[in-house]
Amino acid sequence: MAEKLVIIPTYNEKENIENIIRYVFDLEGNFHILVVEDGSPDGTAAIVKRLMTEFPARLHIQERKGKLGLGTAYIHGFRWALERNYQYIIEMDADFSHSPDDLALLVRACENGADVAIGSRYVDNVIRVVNWPMGRVMMSYFASKYVKVVTGLQIADSTAGFVCYRRRVLETIDLSKIKFIGYAFQIEMKFTATKLGFKVVEVPIIFTDRKEGTSKMNAGIFKEAIFGVIKLRFKKVTPAAGSGQSH
């Protein structure tokens, strides 16, 4: 079995899903893909299932009933991966805002000593975002600055959603205690990994806004991130029972 699993959460991604799957499978590195599908009414699941006949060993789907949130989709995917032999588990969007060509960069960073590799839009104080309205760029950039101030987390792009975890990180984090579901989930995972003593590195990538489909960002997700960060500051982090880690 391949060591590397790319988890792609989907809700109404029929314009993108086939292209992203084929692109990843054309790359070197024998990546597998798990699509966590939240009941898209647009037929996303049917496209994935058709492609599963073409890529039976490499493409997998987990279907959930209803739109349950980004964070719970990834937690579902993490648990699925840990039941199998994957050593590198990667979060990636379906819409090509994260270039699949950068998957190798994240995996290589973990192979070279990182426990968590973040595809970072803002590392070294350089903004690497294409086609976003300036207001959204500033909101995202200063959100990460806000997280630094409130939590002390020394990560330039704490809301990044393009992340590679080594298996042992997800085995050690008590996934049942990860509570946020929107972009705050991304902050909570990075905060928890750091508190447990894992080595987190940022790899510069170019983030390009989606060309097809619609963004899932809304006011509730943004509000959760703002107020969730304050709760995180006071969160006590302990390893999962039985993880054997003393971080």
Image: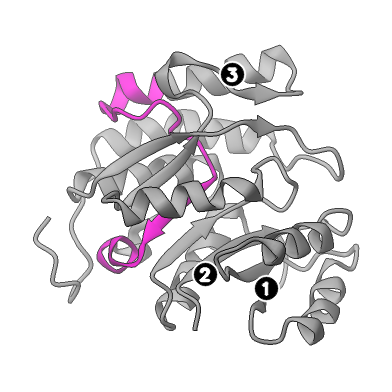
- Residue 160 x/y as whole percent: 51, 38
In the drawing, what numbered circle is on residue 64? 1
Do callouts 1 and 2 mark residues in contact (Cβ within 8 Å)?
A: yes
Q: What residue is disc 2 on? A: 76
Q: What residue is disc 3 on? A: 139
- Residue 237 x/y as whole percent: 21, 51
First in residue order: circle 3 vs circle 1: 1
Task: Say which amino acid is labelled 2.
Answer: His
Pointer 1 local density, CA inside 10 Å: few below 14, some 14–19, many at least 20: some
Q: CA distance from mark 3 to mark 2?
A: 29 Å
- Residue 67 x/y as whole percent: 70, 60
Residue toward you, 24 or 231: 24
Q: Visible in this render: residue 179?
A: no
Q: Is residue 241 above or below residue 224?
A: below
Q: Tell me where the magenta segment starts and ends, as one range.
A: 146-173
User: Which residue of the protein is positioned furthest toward the left in this rendering?
Assistant: 246
